[in-house]
Amino acid sequence: QKAAIKGFEDAQFNLGLCYQYGIGIEKNEAKAFYWYQKAAGQQLSNAQFNLGVCYQNGVGIEKNEAKAFYCYQQAAENGFREAQFNLGICYFNGIGVEKNEFKTFYWYQKAAIKGFEDAQFNLGLCYQYGIGIEKDEAKAFYWYQKAVENGDRDAQYNLGLCYHNGIGIEKDEAKAFYWYQKAAEQQLSNAQFNLGVCYQNGVGIEKNEAKAFYCYQQAAENGFREAQFNLGDCYFNGIGVEKNEFKTFYWYQKAAESGDKDAQYNLSMCYQYGVGIEKNEAKAFYWCHKAAENGDKESQYNLGECYGKEIGTEKDEIKAFFWYHKAAENGINEAQYIIGICYGNGIGIKRDDIKAFYWYKKAAKIGVSEAQYNLGHYYFNGIGTEKDETKAFYWYKKAAKNGDELAQYITGICYENGIGIEKDEAKAFYWYEKAAEQEYNHAQYNLGICYDNGIGVKKNGAEALYWYQKAGENGIKEAQYNLGYCYFNGSGTEKDEIKAFYWYEKAAENEDKEAQNILAMCYEHGIGTEKDKAKASYWYQR
């Protein structure tokens, strides 16, 4: 204090430190500022720097970024490396001065050359991303390496990234692992996370799920949201730890609350299906909405489902359309198909066949079988586009190959009748059979017709009967009528008037006019049933 009063600048600076940190005297930031200012006035660079810090953070004086910049500039020009670094930060962030990337680079370089590790790290960033200088990954690597020599943990992490991804240096996963580990040992959470990824996937080290879990846990406890998400995954899938749905939910929630969209999506799934928490559709909707707003495309689709199907919220077709559209634009195949349905049927939006056609085509090209079928339908009927039977057939067949039973049936019809393709009864039979095996009732009936009449296959009465029966049981009145005929005439089976009557009655009840007449005759003459004139009269009148 005595020396400071006598004007010794170093003493004035040290007295400022005493007042700032309460060393040998009660803490007094205003007096700290006063003595820094005194020493700075005598061109003491470290005092000029500390004075800048006071102005920047409002220590002992009102905050003033312009004055902070001025003080840093004085100290920087006097060669004080910490001030040179802070001056770079000011130019980068526009603190007390206009942003200027070239000057940012200039001052980082000044401090880096003097061995200041923070500046060396930031200079590496400048070279990596082309900030104030032409992008140069080799030089970025060089400066990260320099910062590493001075113990900078962020540089250790970035050096790991460089080796991992081949940035400015040849890719080397073992060295990537080494530097991630170095930074992780210094409690850098993103390095702990990447170390976990290395252990989980065997990157630069033998795969070890238990160690991966441990690393994720360290990073998660340090608040790193990606690690919190991965920890949730570990507990859900039993990766390096026993499965635990409650802990799954806990860590997804932690990451979700920190804004991780993947965790928000998974948390919504937990609430929807009761994973680690009681099922709650309203909360599922809430977190789905959060994730959707953060750009998660699966959540955008799910949000459309929520609004469209009244899951956890009131039904709102306009909002459903909005979120389906978002998901569709982000490449969700199913959403593109549903947007086609919305435009085609005027759901949540004015009907627009041209736009419906556009979205069906988008989804069809990606392989959505329902969209391929609908696209075929649009081409066949000239909806939203010119009628084109060849293109209609093309898309029907695409959908058929993807297992769509209705498309398989229509493809069979196209081959049988030469619609958009050369007539081919064998191929018609093939596709009817495909659809029939999937329990499509109209295809079962057509397959029966094929066997009955030798269309694309050798005639076989027993097979015809089998497929008529399948179709009849599935409600096809023509098949029910044909079954009555088969049993009445002993076609493909033994003659059985009772069964004939049974199937004619089924067809008649399904409004088949011919069956109604025959049923009337059965009642009139007692064929397969007792005579009943009243019922005969009833069915004749039908």
Image (cartoon, rainbow, N blue to C red):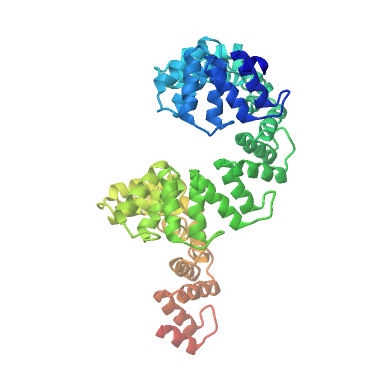
Left or right relative to 180: residue 94: left
Question: Where is residue 48 shown, x and y percent of the image?
Answer: 53, 19
Decide: is 39 above or below 428.
above
Task: Report the residue at 35% width, 46% height from top.
Answer: 361
Quarter of the picture holding the N terminus = top right
Residue 425 position, x and y percent, is 36, 50
**Image position, residue 458 (x, y; %):** 43, 51
Towards the viewer: 109 or 469: 109
Say which of 506 and 87 sits in front: 87
- Taking the spot 41% from the left edge, 23% from the top edge, the residue there is 101
493 to 72, vertically: above or below:
below
Find residue 81 and report its horizontal and vertical position in percent.
53, 14
| On-image quarter of the C terminus | bottom left
Q: Is residue 458 visible?
A: no
Tally the marks.
0
Residue 17 visible from this viewpoint: yes
- Which residue in the rendered view is the most extreme toward the left? 386
Q: Residue at x 36, y 56 (%)?
A: 343
Q: Nearer the viewer, residue 406 or 456?
A: 406
The reply, left or right, for residue 403 in relation to residue 8 is: left
